[in-house]
Amino acid sequence: MKTGTERLAVDFERRTGGMVALTVSGRLDRGTAAVLEGVLHALRGDPSPIVVDLSAVDHIDSYGLDVLLDAEADGRRRRASIEVVGVRESLRSSRSPLEE
């Protein structure tokens, strides 16, 4: 199943053993973060481990990061496994945005 907007897509796959894989592609920002947030919210009642693959995401802003952090915190409260993988090196900043 694929859901999303022109700028963000979330591909959902339930793998052998029940693990849920979410492959996110596009821009995860203020205008699109609600798409991923909705998918993660829909999975709240599912005890299966969730892996969020960001290898096809080319931009993340504070809204997108907030969705990921909220999902991780919610997973901890529920004792559910939520793992974020595939963060591109270009999205990792070694300096503060204020230094740019």
Image: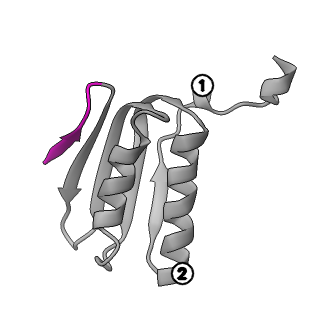
**SS assignment at label 2:** helix
Q: Which residues are magenta?
A: 1-6
How many numbered discs, if any?
2
Q: Is residue 17 magenta?
A: no
Choose between 76 and 90: the one closer to the eye.
Answer: 76
Residue type, mark 2 in image: Arg
Choose between 48 and 75: the one closer to the eye.
Answer: 75
Residue under the point 30% across and 78% down: 45
x, y percentage for residue 11? 23, 45
- Quarter of the image where the C terminus is located: top right
Nearer the observer, disc 1 or disc 2? 2
Instruction: Determine crowd level at label 1: few under 14, some 14-19, many 20+ residues with C-alpha closer than 10 A.
Output: few
14 lies above or below 33: below
Residue type, mark 1 in image: Ser
x, y percentage for residue 52? 40, 52
Residue under the point 22% across and 73% down: 17
x, y percentage for residue 98? 84, 25
Q: Which comes before the other along the chain, label 1 or label 2? A: 2
Disc 1 target residue: 90
- Residue lying furthest right: 99
11 lies above or below 73: above
Disc 2 target residue: 77
- Residue lying furthest top: 100
- Residue lying furthest left: 1
| In this rendering, position of residue 78 left or right of residue 73 | left
| In this rendering, position of residue 43 left or right of residue 27 | left
Question: What's the coloring here?
Answer: one colour
Choose between 33 and 48: the one closer to the eye.
Answer: 33
Instruction: Determine crowd level at label 2: few under 14, some 14-19, many 20+ residues with C-alpha closer than 10 A.
Output: few
11 lies above or below 27: below
| In this rendering, position of residue 1 left or right of residue 45 | left
Residue under the point 78% across and 26% down: 97
